Amino acid sequence: MKETLQAVRGMNDTLPEDVFYWHQLEQALCDISNSFGYQEIRFPILEKTALFKRSIGEETDIVQKEMYTFEDRNGDSLTLRPEGTAACVRACLQHGLLHNQQQRLWYLGPMFRHERPQKGRYRQFYQFGVETFGYDSIDIELELLSMSYRLWQQLGLMEEASLHINTIGTLEERQQYQQALREYLERHQRSLDDDSLRRLEKNPLRILDTKNPQVQAILHEAPQLMDYLSSVSRSRFEALCEGLHALSIPYHVAPSLVRGLDYYSHTVFEWITDSLGAQGAICAGGRYDGLVAQIGNKEVPAAGFAMGLERLVLLLQAKGNCLADKRCDVYVLVDKTISGASVQLSVDRLRKALPQLSFVVDFSGASVKSQLKRADKTKATHALLFLADEFRQGLIGLKSLRVVGEQQWHRLEALSQELLVAEG
Ligand code: HAM
């Protein structure tokens, strides 16, 4: 017997019963982008491998062990995008969107990382991301944080999300700090775990967000990044905190938050939830002023964030916060002696008149009684009855599936008005 084929590990199907949560979320994301004046951009799922190596950083976990990279038939090294920021910058540069212009952009789509799958962590996952270009003041960070905060409000997830922010200063400040941190940690090498030892040489900053209590204990006495920042960088961060205060957005300063991608400078942040176990980050981002120059030799200040949609859907499902969980408004019962085409013709006229309603036609040819039972199992609020005798006289039955009572008979011309009133 042939083996039944399964999806690739860590890559999910979204079934009809869950898709309503996705629609609700995608609608909210579209609405919020619109209300803040952000425009959608779409870019390919595949990019040249060099783009991600150059931007995310050669020594990061993503580039070292998580990318889906392969040679295509021409021998070019290509990678399934592990995130959207690098590709967004590439697209903007390629199409001249950053010539003396400011941009506020958003995108939504699948990303790919070969991580160990678990609840909330997948190998194909969806991100909604926003990227801004040409804004160098903290006002844009505040806008990004208001935008995400507003989204939690709209989705009823205010209680779930807490904001963690930090500043990692400029590249030069960070390099000086890295040197001091490395020297300190080298003196404690014997207490470091394998992961930290591996990072010590190339990426010591990442040791700061270790989960290992023994390493955390050593870090208590380690040099602090804040002490290596210039007064300009520090006052920038203070102004950001004041702005958050003025906007009434609660936040925690998290000195160990450094992010796993190399392109950030100054502000970094994550919205974290306690409700998803280890995979608590639902949205993350920050400022990345150096990245455009790194990809395209052009100095353009930039900031953005991305959120993981699977994680948000899990939160919405746990709360039962789905506004749109409806498959059908009107269930159409058909006597088997009536021609399917004439029913479709009539229902299509109703669909045209009432595009906001969904009509499902029962073509089973089963008895009207069993069709009615099936209608009751759907979430439909009304049934239409196409019965042989009445239909011959030009009449269609309208019956509520929520309120007990007899059906009423109407001509097709009057039915759309009746349905409109009945559906409220
Ligand atoms: P990131 O922190 O790597 O940042 O990912 C952003 C969000 O994507 C995470 O907070 C999480 O919600 C979701 N996510 C990441 N990996 C997975 C996974 N394996 N499974 C499910 N969800 C996941 C970035 O990607 C940056 N490009 C964000 C950014 C945009 N910074 C500036 N602009």
Image: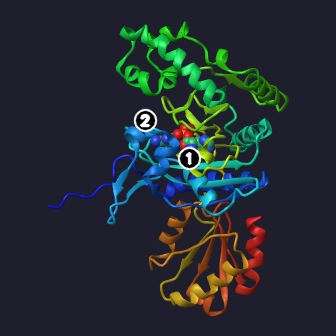
The amino acid type, in three-letter code, at marker 1 is Leu
* Secondary structure of the residue carrying numbered label 1: helix
- Residue at x 47% of width, y 76% of height: 367
**Is the CB atom of the residue marked by disc 1 within 8 angstroms of ligand 1's nearest atom?**
yes
Query: Considering only vertical position in the picture, is 165 above or below 123?
Result: above
Mark 1, Cα crowd under 10 Å, few <14 / some 14-19 / many 20+, is many
Query: Considering only vertical position in the picture, is 136 above or below 133?
Result: above
Examine the rendering and report whether any part of residue 86 can be seen: yes
- Residue at x 67% of width, y 75% of height: 398
Instruction: Using the image as rendered, state which of residue 352 and residue 260 is in the foreground.
Output: 260
Question: What is the spatial separation of the Cα atoms under label 2 and label 1, in whole angstroms?
Answer: 21 Å
Q: Quadrant of residue 172?
A: top right
Instruction: Using the image as rendered, state which of residue 395 and residue 174 is in the foreground.
Output: 174
* Secondary structure of the residue carrying numbered label 2: helix
Q: Which residue is mark 1?
A: 309
Judged from the image, the quadrant occupied by ligand 1 is top right
Label disc, if present, on residue 61 of the rendered structure: 2
**Is the CB atom of the residue marked by disc 2 within 8 angstroms of ligand 1's nearest atom?**
no
Examine the rendering and report whether any part of residue 314 can be seen: no
Residue 183 x %, y %:
48, 13
Q: Residue furthest right?
A: 246
Q: Quadrant of residue 365?
A: bottom left
